[in-house]
């Protein structure tokens, strides 16, 4: 049985703050500060350029990638870290389209995170081969999979509602139609059990600053099914994906397996912080995590529905159909969330009308969830949100 | 007059080490450790998600980008940080080709850093519009510019030899032929005066972990001439390049000016370290830096040629034709450099036969340069390099 009181002790959370936004940015793992500072002093400072070999920097996108891989059901050597999720989406989609040259449809849904859709449409316009980005409602995806589809590109957990796609079933459906499946795990990795190998996913991408607590702008990851990795031509053919980067050949020759998905120089400082953050997962059973997450979100829904009749649940009611977050809807959602933050309960707002809360058992307990619901009740009951300052839009919402 | 004894005091350099590899990885600025740790504790740790607004994280790719811009003659608001240099090359080239749709040649030289060439050939293959990557010798570039060229894509300072292109003249020539000019400043930014606006460059890219001392894997930068920025369609159309990232529209709409070259979430930890590193440039006159760099490299060449008759200068002899690095050639260059590193003089090796040394007045004086030459003399005179252990290739050379 996973001891979540132990994992909670690993994180810094400000006193009095109820942090229900780990689905957007995970909190600071206490060890990450010292680990990063030590890396800077002892590796960058003392080893200098020798750190690439002596401190293993060059290998970290793979070695730390494997630590992420273990949380998402990816076999050793099938995940690599680097860049941002947007870049990783581009790589996966470019590779998928080239593996299905006769097909012209990229199928996604309107619950996908916008950057995935933006990257896809930029790619389609650049490649200019007559591809079409077809965006349907999440519940229409399954029926829209047919033999025109080159790639099914979905985010497993909807960033707004928390709605969870059935990765295994949709991947099977895609394969049966001859399409490839690309899964964005931004809201899945570290949030619930993921079994990429079991689902036979073709590609997966994700970020490490949400449930994996790697810090703001922490590197993204990409998974390519080992059965495909050697067939993939990297569209972003950077030198660190080359078979022999330090031969400095003029011609590109793709590296072995997942290594070809590397592009440029690894972000070593960010990798140090992420490596420290991943220590929190040692000894965590993902089934325990899932059970605890469901307990927290069910409790939160029950408390909020009882206390705040003006809020409408925007997430699936069945916890098996949700990831690890819950949204409530209200026309004044933006101001409500601002007021809630001013009262030390942090969630976030997603346009047009969703207030969103993430449930992260590594460092949250039922007390937090109840405290969050209580403060939300007060804000709604006393209309504390209805002040001009809470309506003023910030740059980042 | 710039006081380089003051800038030297800002860096951590291990006792007894002669570090002539700042052209590959700059040393640790002492303040960077505390600045990064403070950012992690007080911003990530205490502000959590609020850091995007309250700590200015979201604006840093532009605000810190402007600090880099001041070192390369770029006007305010024309430089943005993020991703790796490879990705930035891809963005610049994709944009340039789309601005010259009737032309099919990308002109570069064999002194360009391989990743630029790799990214270009990957792009050409993906876009599949009949483009050709034409690679000539550096001295043949000027004559090869003609009206078939869509984009001239060069690294200003050759990573192997230090040979310096005439950015202004070649850009003029490119423009006269109707082509666009993309400059890679990896070995220029912080190494010598660069005047992007004065040269009327169209695009420029570079990294910040060499002469700018941002740390291993520090973010890259991209410059787009303000006259072009609004015309450019981003091929890598990520959400942070969107005009309204937090509206979460399904359709992409490019942001204003250089903002559209942003892709994904900014690497905030790395930006904190880079910001600290850039403080070293306050009060540095780039003309003084250049004069000091030439003094150092001239002294090194004179010392090495006098002491090591078996080594052949691989760099232009005229300092005005060089950047801030010098190479010597020897068939056993790899082993010689390994032996030199074992004797606490760090340069690096570039296949097939160059040993390379960077001269960085911010933290190097003539004493260092002479000490380096002395130890090199001993290694050559006593054939200390001729031992099996120095011939064993490491992963990173």
Image (cartoon, coloured by chain):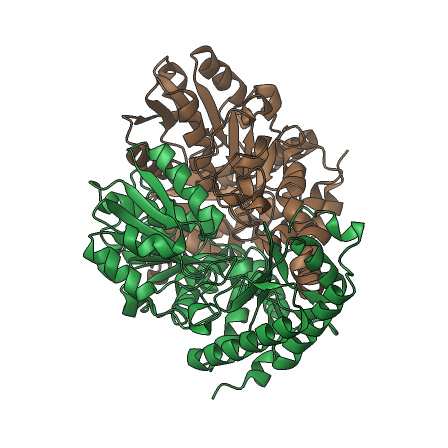
Chain colours: A green, B brown
The x and y percentages for residue B63 are 67, 41
In front here: A30 or A288? A288
Question: Residue most toward the front?
Answer: A309
Relative to B50, residue A69 above or below: below
Q: Indicate the position of residue A49 as horizontal and vertical percent values.
A: 51, 54
- The foreground one among B158 and A181 is A181
Residue B228: which quarter of the image?
A: top right
Q: Is residue B49 visible?
A: yes
Q: Is residue B152 something one can see in this rendering?
A: no
In percent of the image, x 32 and y 69: which residue is there?
A76
Q: Could you tell me which residue is drawn at 67 percent across and 46 percent down?
A: A395
List the single residue furthest toward the bottom. A1
Determine whether B144 is above or below A257 in the image.
above
Q: Nearer the viewer, residue B60 or B118?
A: B60
**A22 left or right, relative to B138:** right
Q: Residue placed at 37% from the left, 33% from the top?
A: A126
Count numbered badges in the picture: 0
Give the quarter of the image for residue B212: top right
Q: Residue at x 63, y 57 (%)?
A: A330
Judge from the rendering whether residue B155 lies leftward or rightward of residue A342; answer left or right: left
Q: Is residue B103 left or right of residue B279?
A: left
**Quadrant of the drawing holding the N terminus of chain B:** top right
Q: Between residues A110 and B105, which one lies in front from this camera angle?
A: A110
Give the image location of residue B76, x and y in percent.
67, 31
Residue B366 screen position, x and y as percent = 64, 43
């Amino acid at each position: 049985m996973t001891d979540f009181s132990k994992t909670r002790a690993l994180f810094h959370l400000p006193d009095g703050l109820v942090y229900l936004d780990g689905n957007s940015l995970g909190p600071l793992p206490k060890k990450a500060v010292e680990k990063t500072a030590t890396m800077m002093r002892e590796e960058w400072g003392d080893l200098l350029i020798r750190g690439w070999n002596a401190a293993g920097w060059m290998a970290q996108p793979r070695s730390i990638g494997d630590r992420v891989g273990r949380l998402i059901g990816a076999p050793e050597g099938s995940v690599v870290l680097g860049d941002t999720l947007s870049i990783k989406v581009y790589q996966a989609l470019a590779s998928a389209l080239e593996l299905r040259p006769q097909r012209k449809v990229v199928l996604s849904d309107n619950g996908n995170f916008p950057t995935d859709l933006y990257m896809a449409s930029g790619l389609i316009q650049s490649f200019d081969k007559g591809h079409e980005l077809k965006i349907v409602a999440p519940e229409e995806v399954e029926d829209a999979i047919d033999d025109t589809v080159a790639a099914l590109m979905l985010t497993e957990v909807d960033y707004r509602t928390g709605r969870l796609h059935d990765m295994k079933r949709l991947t099977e459906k895609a394969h049966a139609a001859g399409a490839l499946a690309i899964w964005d795990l931004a809201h899945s990795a570290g949030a619930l059990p993921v079994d990429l190998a079991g689902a036979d996913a073709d590609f997966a991408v994700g970020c490490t600053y949400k449930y994996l607590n790697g810090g703001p702008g922490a590197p993204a990851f990409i998974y390519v099914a080992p059965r495909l990795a050697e067939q993939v031509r990297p569209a972003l053919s950077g030198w660190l994906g080359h078979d022999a980067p330090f031969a400095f050949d003029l011609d590109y020759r793709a590296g072995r397996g997942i290594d070809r998905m590397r592009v440029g120089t690894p972000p070593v400082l960010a990798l140090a912080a992420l490596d420290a953050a991943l220590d929190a997962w040692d000894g965590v059973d993902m089934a325990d995590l899932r059970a605890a997450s469901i307990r927290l979100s069910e409790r939160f829904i029950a408390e909020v529905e009882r206390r705040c009749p003006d809020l409408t649940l925007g997430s699936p009611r069945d916890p098996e159909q949700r990831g690890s977050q819950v949204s409530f809807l209200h026309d004044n959602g933006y101001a409500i969330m601002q007021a809630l933050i001013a009262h030390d309960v942090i969630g976030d707002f997603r346009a047009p009308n969703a207030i969103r809360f993430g449930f992260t058992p590594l460092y949250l307990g039922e007390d937090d969830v109840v405290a969050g619901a209580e403060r939300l009740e007060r804000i709604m009951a006393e209309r504390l949100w209805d002040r001009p300052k809470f309506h003023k839009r910030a740059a980042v919402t």
